Image (cartoon, rainbow, N blue to C red):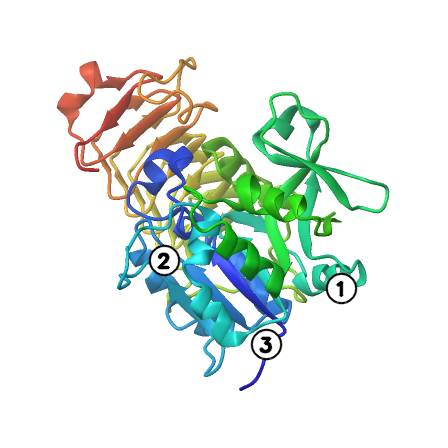
């Protein structure tokens, strides 16, 4: 059997609850990004660009669309007879069967998959970050450091460090201490949730910690390995990395793509981002439209004005419509004379004519203020917005709505319409 030097285990089972209605029907890694891609395309493309050709994708929450997107991995050149991409959902075992209860528990439940390849190293990845990284360079660092475990770290502003697991290292980059989401962080070196383990170290730790409830890498496995005296090093990553875990960070990362000099460049020849592409006609831009600093997907028809926005494929924007600072995903329809400001519109949404979105004063959202903030209007997939209504800021809508649900034609800032079963 051909032995694999390093295989990747890609954790893609998360719900992404902080993305609210965007993830009510699909897993966070399957959410659209940049008009053309899904979030999971970035770690998958990093793998093939780094020469990692064996990837296990661990799915759980709402996996259907993610499975359809990945298929047999052809879009990423991961359709291989030996290796390639394998989707690994939880499955029934002869003993006690259970869902994946934590990141490390999910990996533990797939020991058999890893043992089949008997790799020297295992790369653990999250399926919900936007970045480009050469994992081969990180592996070279792991080998040259003679590390048992290497964590990729990223310097974040100290005021944001409490959102992350942070590490404290010595002058040689060897990790001395861990703090998981500390209230008063002593370091701004955040763990990116990317790990390289020497395989025997990972296997031993997973077996020893198998009975820990909701076993997690950051909270349990890494401290356990550290307590056993293993050498854990920090690989300081200097490129672009964005955790798009909140609506604000997701919107911001998309908006950065359309700036004059984008911080994150989708157009580099030498490090392409691959995705499953449908065969669509080219986009159509009418003579009365006016477009400035936008990404426009294939098969879209633009008859209105669009500025500083990311438009997916198959989108129709009607005459006289004005779209600003917004993300509009695949196959959405925007009616005649509608104005949209700072909104995230999910796939297959129909917005009527003469609608105003994102107007007025900001107010705190009354349904889930910790999710629906940042001044955004967020509309979940397959939703319908009737003609002639005005919608404020920090608003969430999902479902087919009618004019009666907008008192005097208005949905005030901070309000929500969340249909049962959505």
Asked which secondary structure carries label 2, the reply is helix
How far is mark 1 from mark 2, CA to CA? 33 Å
Based on the displayed image, in which of its 4 quarters is residue 366 positioned? top left
The residue where tag 3 is placed is 4
Name the disc covering residue 354, or none: none
| Residue 19 visible somewhere in the drawing | yes
Instruction: Write the residue at 63% across / 74% down.
Output: 5
Given residues 257 and 105, the one toward you in this image is 105
Asked which secondary structure carries label 1, the reply is helix
Q: Are the residues flagged by discs 3 and 1 in contact, CB closer than 8 Å? A: no
The residue where tag 1 is placed is 143
**Taking 373 as reference, is 270 above or below it?**
below
Horizontally, is 178 left or right of 300 in the view? right
Horizontally, is 142 left or right of 267 in the view? right
The residue where tag 2 is placed is 66
Dot placed on the residue nearer the N-terminal end, 2 or 3: 3
| Mark in the foreground, 1 or 2 | 1
Q: Tell me where residue 74 appears, x and y as whole percent.
A: 44, 74
């Amino acid at each position: 059997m051909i032995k694999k030097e390093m295989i990747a285990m890609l954790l893609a089972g998360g719900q992404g609850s902080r993305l609210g209605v965007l993830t009510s029907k699909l897993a966070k890694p399957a959410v659209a990004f940049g008009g053309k891609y899904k979030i999971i395309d970035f770690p998958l493309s990093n793998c093939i660009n780094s020469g990692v050709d064996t990837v296990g994708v661990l799915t759980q929450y709402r996996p259907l669309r993610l499975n359809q997107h990945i298929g047999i991995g052809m879009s990423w050149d991961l359709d291989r007879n030996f290796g390639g991409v394998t989707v690994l959902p939880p499955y029934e075992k002869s003993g006690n069967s259970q869902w994946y209860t934590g990141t490390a528990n999910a990996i533990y439940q797939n020991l058999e998959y890893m043992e089949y390849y008997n790799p020297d190293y295992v790369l653990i990845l999250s399926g919900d970050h936007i970045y480009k990284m050469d994992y081969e360079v990180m592996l070279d660092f792991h080998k040259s450091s003679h590390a048992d475990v290497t964590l990729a770290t990223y310097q974040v502003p100290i005021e944001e460090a409490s959102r992350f697991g942070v590490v404290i290292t010595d002058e040689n980059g060897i990790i001395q201490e861990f703090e998981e989401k500390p209230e008063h962080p002593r370091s701004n070196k955040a763990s990116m949730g990317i790990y390289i383990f020497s395989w025997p170290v990972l296997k031993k730790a997973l077996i020893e910690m198998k009975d820990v409830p909701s076993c997690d890498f950051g909270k349990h496995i890494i401290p356990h390995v550290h307590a056993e005296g293993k050498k854990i090093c920090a690989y300081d990553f200097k490129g672009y990395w964005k955790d798009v875990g909140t609506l604000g960070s997701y919107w911001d990362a998309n908006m950065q793509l359309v700036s004059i000099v984008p911080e994150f460049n989708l157009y580099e020849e030498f490090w392409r981002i691959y995705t499953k592409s449908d065969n669509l006609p080219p986009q159509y831009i009418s003579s009365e439209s006016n477009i400035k600093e936008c990404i426009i997907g294939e098969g879209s028809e633009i008859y209105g004005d669009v500025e500083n926005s990311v438009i997916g494929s198959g989108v129709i924007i009607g005459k006289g419509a004005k779209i600003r600072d917004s993300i509009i995903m695949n196959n959405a329809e925007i009616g005649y004379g509608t104005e949209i400001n700072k909104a995230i519109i999910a796939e297959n949404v129909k917005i009527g004519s003469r609608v105003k979105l994102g107007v007025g004063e900001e107010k705190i959202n009354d349904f889930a203020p910790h999710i629906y903030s940042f001044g955004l209007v967020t509309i979940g997939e397959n939703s319908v917005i009737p003609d002639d209504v005005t919608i404020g800021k920090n608003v969430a809508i999902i479902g087919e709505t009618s004019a009666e649900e907008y008192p005097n034609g208005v949905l005030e800032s901070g309000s929500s319409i969340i249909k049962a079963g959505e």
